[in-house]
Image (cartoon, helix red, strand yellow):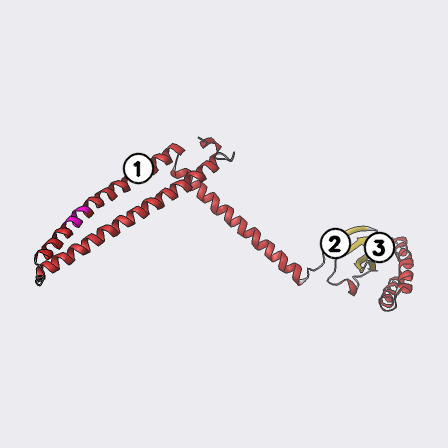
Amino acid sequence: MWLSGLIGMLMERMMRYGNFFWGVVVALIPFSVAAQQGKGGAARVFSCEINGRSVFGDTLPKECYGRAWTEKINGVVVYREEAQPTPDESARRREQAQRQEEARKEAARQKRQDDALLERYPSLEDLDQRRDHEIAELDKTIGELRVDEQRLDARRKGLDDEVKALKGKPVPADLRRVRNYADEELAQVRAAIERKINERNNLRQRFDADRRQYLEITSSGSAFGSKKN
């Protein structure tokens, strides 16, 4: 024990005064280990690296706190402590963990979308048929609205002819009210037509996107390969 204490004291001096004491410490360590083994005890040595130099002790030297260090018994490593990360390293690890978590969530979200798409369309043919049917329904509605537009536009022109027939005379209140109502109806029908056209365009885009995704899923050699068309 006295030799271990001497080694510890010499290591402290070495940290202060440099290489001379370092050489003495390195020379004495084998004698300390041999002395403990000669007594039938286990030679326990703690060590770490500081600026390329090893620091030893029979207890963990204070210089090793916060650094990577090892504990050996009779020359065999029985414990290894990793160095405490610096603030920058901790920040990088948190960022990496966050990116990995975001990637995991995105992969899970994509899988849910893929599963839902394959459940919605048993086959690519079914997807195309569904698209054609829904677009045909919208085209039918747009056609009916076009008929209403033509009827209301013709009515509006007839009311304009009645106003022209007055040849500058005051327009009766009833005629003015009917014409304003006709204007409102015509504007509503035209707005409905525009909405349905936008709906049809969005529907086409959605089905195109679904079709691309469906082909990607079923041609990727994944677990969905059994549904490949």
- Which mark is in front, 3 or 1? 1
Q: Is residue 99 left or right of residue 120?
A: right
In space, the residues marked 2 and 1 are separated at their CA atoms by 68 Å
- Which mark is in front, 2 or 1? 1
Q: Is residue 97 left or right of residue 135?
A: right
Q: Magenta residues, as a range?
A: 150-154
Q: Which residue is mark 1?
A: 133
Badge 3 or badge 1: first in the primary sequence: 3
**Magenta-highlighted stretch: main secondary structure?**
helix
Using the image, tell me which numbered label, if any, was put on residue 80.
2
In space, the residues marked 3 and 1 are separated at their CA atoms by 84 Å
In space, the residues marked 2 and 3 are separated at their CA atoms by 17 Å
Tell me if residue 151 is in the magenta stretch: yes
Along the viewing direction, whichever of 77 and 69 lies nearer the viewer: 69
Residue 152, x across and y down, in percent? 17, 49
Q: Is residue 143 left or right of residue 66?
A: left
Please, what is the three-letter code of the amino acid marked with disc 3? Ala
Q: Which residue is mark 3?
A: 43
Q: Secondary structure at mark 2?
A: strand
Please, what is the three-letter code of the amino acid marked with disc 1? His
Badge 2 or badge 1: first in the primary sequence: 2
Please, what is the three-letter code of the amino acid marked with disc 2? Arg
Residue 213 quadrant: top left
Residue 125 quadrant: top left
- Which mark is in front, 2 or 3? 2
Q: Secondary structure at mark 1?
A: helix
Tell me if residue 108 is in the magenta stretch: no
Q: Is residue 215 visible?
A: yes
Q: Residue at x 40, y 40 (%)?
A: 208
Badge 2 or badge 3: first in the primary sequence: 3
Q: Is residue 123 visible?
A: no
